[in-house]
Image (cartoon, rainbow, N blue to C red):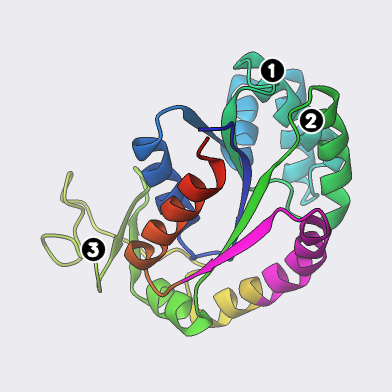
Amino acid sequence: MRPLRALFLGAPGSGKGTQVSRLVRDFPHIAALSSGDVLRQNIVRKTPVGIKAASIIEQGGLVPDETMVNLIKEELSAHNWLNSKASWLLDGFPRTAPQAPPLDALLKEYSAGLNFVVELKVPEEVILDRIENRYVHLPSGRVYNLTFNPPKVAGRDDVTGEPLSKRPDDTPEVFKKRLDKYRDMTMPLKEYYDKQGILKSIEGETSDIIYPKLKKLIVETFHD
């Protein structure tokens, strides 16, 4: 397959994490990079960027675009992915149109520009239903859904037996606002990549419906 350098877009609750994990399983040569994970790891390790980011976040601010681009650059560089032969996908950055050109400029320096941007489109009512039925084991982060992934014992974590909880923002009212914000932020970003001719969208109500479509699209697009 030709190298894949992808960006995944999708509303909160659309199942991006599930799709990414399945892709990495089925295509071992594709590496995944979550900007949120990278940021958290730098904060935990107390790197210079992590210390700066932690201070900004503690004050309720947003990490500057330049800082995020540098983080992504360092991560891609550390894994030797800044070359035209590596295959990888980004999850979580860029989030807005102003963040895209600096990333583009960086990647093009190495002839490693994005060549595939895909948005996962799940109906809003489906996402809200998922959220209403979502419970989490806070210490481990294990997530359950009463509809399609219920715990073995109601209200208890499968591994520890400890109580499950609702995240404070897992309410239809709060999530509706997050979905509205996502749409407002992402529309200009989608237009930006659409003009480059690399934007695709895949629709479906469940991850099991979306994934075969995603896999087929990648094979057809990047097969030599």
Could you say which is closer to the camera, residue 78 or residue 194?
A: 194
Q: Residue at x 25, y 74 (%)?
A: 147
Residue at image location 82% in from the left, 47% down from the top:
100
In terms of sequence position, does the residue under pointer 3 or pointer 2 come before the other? 2
- The amino acid at mark 1 is Ser
Q: Where does the image place residue 62, in percent across and percent down from the top left?
A: 79, 49
Residue at the disc numbered 1: 77
In this view, 162 is above or below 182: above
Task: Label 1: state its secondary structure.
Answer: helix
Q: Residue furthest left?
A: 153
Q: What residue does disc 2 label?
A: 107
Q: Which mark is residue 156?
A: none
Range of the magenta residues? 180-203
* Three-letter amino acid code of the residue under disc 3: Asn
Q: CA distance from mark 3 to mark 1?
A: 37 Å
Using a 10 Å C-alpha cutoff, classify the residue at mark 2 as few (fewer than 14 neighbours), some (14 to 19) or many (20 or more). Answer: some
Q: Nearer the viewer, mark 3 or mark 2?
A: 2
Q: Is residue 84 left or right of residue 130?
A: right
In the image, residue 162 lies in the stretch drawn in magenta? no
**Is residue 38 positioned above or below 148 on the image?**
above
Name the residue that disc number 3 marks. Answer: 149
Q: Marks 3 and 1: which is nearer the front? A: 1
As helix, strand or loop, the secondary structure at mark 2 comes to helix
Question: Residue 79 location, x and y as percent?
Answer: 59, 17
